[in-house]
Amino acid sequence: MIKMGIIGLGHWGPNLLRNFDQHPEVDVKIVCDKAEAKKIKRPRPEIVFTRDSAAVTAADNGIDAVVIATPLSAHFEIARAALTNGKHLFIEKPIAPTAAETLELTELAKRQDLRFMVGHVFLYNAGIRYVKEQIDRGELGRILYIHGQRTNLGPVRPDASALWDLAAHDVSIFNYWLDAVPAAAAAGGSAFLNPAVEDIVNATFNYPGNVKCNILASWLHPSKVRQITVVGDQKMLIWDDMSHAEPVRIFDKSICRAIPEQIEGTLSEFRFSIQDGQIFIPRLRQCEPLKEECNHFVDCVLHHRTPLSDGINGYQVVAALEAAAESMRRQSMTIEVKIAGKYR
């Protein structure tokens, strides 16, 4: 049994508590939050409640693994304490506010030989994994660009912009699908509700092979949208997380040159052929991504495996977000994504 402690029971923490507590190989021993004990719903009365995170991360408390779901600003110090004291670690995305802090935690976990996993929950989504298979098999042809939209009316976060809160998901998905990290980023945002925090962000990430990945992230939209379009030179697809019946649709559509050789300065230069075929809707096994993610962490701890969304994966995402945030501060200038050579 993995003896576990969970820190942070605000917006997302209760969902993690529910899933880990239901796992047959996990014993949740202690939970921590700044709220009063009477406001915290514990699935079992024997679970200890504390308002002190040090009680969860202490070296001699018998806890094997720690889960962190606090506001971003608190991640680094708590995570460092947990890893230093020999705890396996599951931490909600993003790992830390800076790439340097994220890298420090990643290398600390490696030195301590601890499992370090980041909560990029969409990597455990059946639709996202199916799209990965299609891209890897070359079903769409050469990937030209990817466009994502992640919007809703709230919840508004005071501690992190829409870039860090929402677009972090999409960057993790882009990296996963393309098996790459972006070389550069350019972004623009607007802060309508809180002058210190952008609630609407448009960001573009430049990947190897001249693949452009764009994302609109906003918590100031009237409808909830979780959708990504992938355009290949042979086929296209749409992943729609809000469609439970048809989360993935593959379009046999493309545009290609009408004749093998187009001569510049002649009419042939402008001749293209549009392929407009059928739409294929695969049948996917429905599962709860968060449950899959939690099960994966437990499996990695018990069997000494590297998580799919490990510290390196999280570091690469934070480095891309950091470049996009710097771009917003510099009037949408294109900024290089700086990643340590051995982790690129």
Image (cartoon, helix red, strand yellow):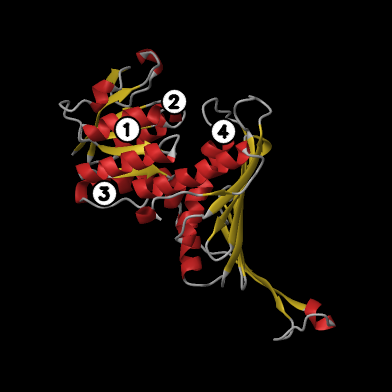
Is 177 on the left-hand or right-hand side of 2?
A: right
- Label 2, label 4: how far apart the Cα atoms are: 18 Å
Badge 3 density bin: few <14, some 14–19, many ≥20, Cα 10 Å? some
- Label 2, label 1: how far apart the Cα atoms are: 18 Å
Q: Which of 70 and 5 is in front in this view?
A: 70
Instruction: Say which label, 3 or 4, has the lower sequence index.
Output: 4
Q: Can residue 71 be seen in this view?
A: no
**Position of residue 38 measured from the top left corner of the image (x, y, whole percent):** 37, 13
Instruction: Say which label, 1 or 3, has the lower sequence index.
Output: 1
Badge 2 density bin: few <14, some 14–19, many ≥20, Cα 10 Å? some
**Position of residue 54 measured from the top left corner of the image (x, y, whole percent):** 27, 22
C-beta proximity under 8 Å, tags 1 and 3: no
- Which disc, if any, is residue 336? none
Circle 3 is placed at which residue position?
300
- Which disc, if any, is residue 161? 4
* Mark 3 secondary-structure assignment: helix
Question: Where, by quadrant of the figure, is residue 189 drawn?
Answer: top right
Circle 2 is placed at which residue position?
10
- Which disc, if any, is residue 79? 1
